Image (cartoon, rainbow, N blue to C red):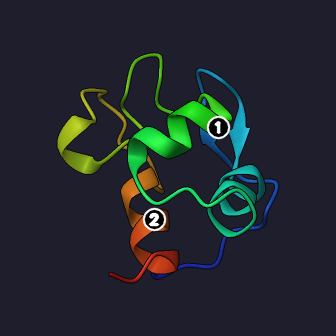
Amino acid sequence: MARNFPHSFIVCECKRVSLGEIIYAIKEKGAKTLEDIEDITDAGSSCGCCRSAADDIGEKKMELYLDEILNKFVKE
């Protein structure tokens, strides 16, 4: 996540879930896994391309993935 993204940036195109919603799910709702984010926001529950680069089957790669966001905010 080298670049700064606004909270309005849409991470999950299928479900129209923004970065701000994902950060809220992590910080305020306690999401610690991709499954938690999916349960709380619905992000990643359709095609799954936004989950990680390995899951991205699209021709045009995503700019930001859920696992990158999770890794930035959830320290194990």
Q: Nearer the viewer, residue 45 or 76?
A: 76
Residue at 47% x, 16% y is: 46
Q: Nearer the viewer, residue 57 or 69?
A: 69
Q: Is residue 40 above or below residue 33?
A: above
CB of mark 1 within 8 Å of CB of mark 2?
A: no
Residue at 29% x, 29% y is: 59
> Callout 1: 10 Å neighbours few (<14), some, many (20+)?
some
Tell me which amino acid carries mark 2: Leu
Can you tell which of label 1 and label 2 is closer to the viewer?
1
| Quarter placement of the C terminus | bottom left
Q: Earlier in the sequence, mark 1 or mark 2?
A: 1
Left/right of residue 59 with respect to residue 62 in the rendered view: left
Q: Mark yes or no: residue 65 visible.
A: no
Residue 25 at what x, y percent from top left?
68, 54
Tag on residue 18?
Answer: none
Q: Mark yes or no: residue 14 visible.
A: yes
Q: Residue furthest top?
A: 46
Q: Nearer the viewer, residue 70 or 55?
A: 70
Residue 41 at what x, y percent from top left?
66, 36
The residue identified by callout 2 is 70
Judged from the image, the secondary structure of the residue bearing numbered disc 2 is helix
The residue identified by callout 1 is 40
Residue 14 at what x, y percent from top left?
58, 21
Residue at 45% x, 65% y is: 70
Judged from the image, the secondary structure of the residue bearing numbered disc 1 is helix
Tell me which amino acid carries mark 1: Ile
Q: Is residue 16 above or below residue 73?
A: above
Label 1 and label 2: CA atoms lie apart by 14 Å
